[in-house]
Image: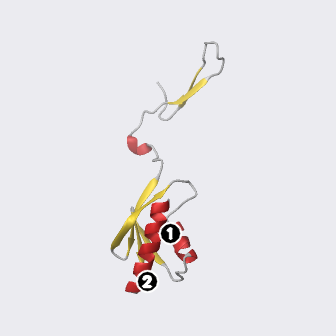
């Protein structure tokens, strides 16, 4: 009857006088976009927390920008599926990154 994902308009015949719009969903749940993307954040192999992207403009690379603002100059980062792994060459720097990123994910 309706195309998959079609917009349907019903004219309101009541006193209000404006049409009502709604979306007909005839598809699989995998067709629907999630409201937010969530990544598990690691420094080396140490779990730090979950990083949730709320706005459309946000992406996983925001972690690198945040660390640059915190004074870390040579940040290496990998995004593997729903994991963000920040790679640190030294143990001291890894601990400082972990502390900064814990505050970052808790404040968001």
Q: Is residue 8 left or right of residue 94?
A: right
Q: Earlier in the sequence, mark 2 or mark 1?
A: 1
Provide residue 96's location: percent of width, then percent of height. 44, 79
Q: Residues within 10 Å of mark 2 (few under 14, many from 20)?
A: some
Provide residue 81's location: percent of width, then percent of height. 39, 63
**Where 103 falls versus 28 (above or below)?**
below
**Where 1 falls versus 81 (above or below)?**
above
Q: Point out the frontmost of discs 2 and 1.
A: 2
Residue that badge 2 annotates: 93
- Residue at the location (49% across, 61% down)? 107
The residue lying furthest to the right in this view is: 17
Q: Residues within 10 Å of mark 1 (few under 14, many from 20)?
A: many
- Residue at the location (52% across, 75% down)? 67
**Where 20 falls versus 82 (above or below)?**
above
**Where 4 falls versus 40 (above or below)?**
above
For label 2, the SS is helix
Residue that badge 1 annotates: 63
Q: Nearer the viewer, residue 77 or 96?
A: 96
- Residue at the location (49% across, 35% down)? 5
- Residue at the location (55% across, 59% down)? 58
The tag on residue 14 is none
Q: Is residue 56 left or right of residue 79?
A: right
For label 1, the SS is helix
């Amino acid at each position: 009857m309706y195309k998959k994902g079609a917009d349907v308009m019903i004219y309101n015949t009541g006193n209000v006088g404006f049409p009502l719009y709604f979306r007909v969903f005839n598809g699989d749940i995998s067709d629907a976009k999630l409201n937010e993307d969530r990544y598990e954040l690691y420094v080396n192999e140490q779990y730090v927390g979950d990083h949730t992207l709320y706005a459309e403009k946000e992406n996983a690379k925001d972690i690198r920008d945040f660390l640059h603002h915190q004074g870390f100059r040579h940040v290496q980062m990998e995004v593997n599926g729903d994991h963000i792994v920040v790679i640190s060459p030294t143990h001291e720097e890894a601990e400082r990154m972990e502390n900064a990123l814990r505050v970052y994910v808790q404040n968001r």
